[in-house]
Image: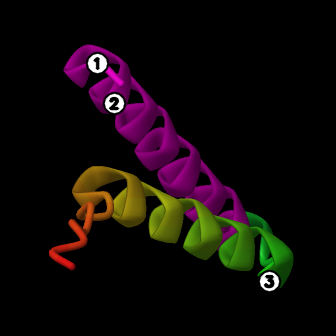
Amino acid sequence: MSVVYRILIALVLLVCAISAYSFGNSAGLFGFIILGFLFEAAFWLKLFGRKKTTNKA
């Protein structure tokens, strides 16, 4: 996956998380706060990614 594509996905996830938090707080809907939490978790997981393990057998 290219670096630009990875950064673009991370920014979209961050914007979605902030939007969901904002709407959840202003409207008082707990579901949108949970949705914001899920988008934020996806953002952090996408930002750092998983390290590939090499098998040294």
Mark 1 crowd level (few <14, some 14–19, many ≥20, 10 Å Cα):
few
Q: Is residue 7 magenta?
A: yes
Seen at 39% across and 64% down, the residue is: 45
Label 3 is placed on what type of residue?
A: Phe
Q: Which residue is mark 2?
A: 6
In the rendered view, tell whether residue 42 sits above or below residue 16.
below
**Residue 6 placed where, x, y %?**
34, 30
Q: Which residue is mark 3?
A: 30
Query: Does residue 10 appear to the left or right of 17 in the view shown?
Result: left
Q: Is residue 34 magenta?
A: no
Quarter of the image for residue 8 reads: top left
Mark 3 vs mark 2, foreground winner is 2
Label 1 is placed on what type of residue?
A: Ser
- Disc 3 + disc 2, Cβ < 8 Å: no
Mark 3 crowd level (few <14, some 14–19, many ≥20, 10 Å Cα):
few
- Disc 2 + disc 1, Cβ < 8 Å: yes
Residue extent of the magenta highlight: 1-26
In the rendered view, tell whether residue 15 sits above or below residue 32.
above
Mark 2 crowd level (few <14, some 14–19, many ≥20, 10 Å Cα):
few
Q: Kindly report the distance in space between the C-alpha atoms of the residues bearing marks 3 and 2.
A: 29 Å
Label 2 is placed on what type of residue?
A: Arg
Mark 1 vs mark 3, foreground winner is 1
Query: Does residue 20 appear to the left or right of 12 in the view shown?
Result: right
Q: Which residue is mark 1?
A: 2
Q: Classify mark 2: helix, strand or loop.
A: helix
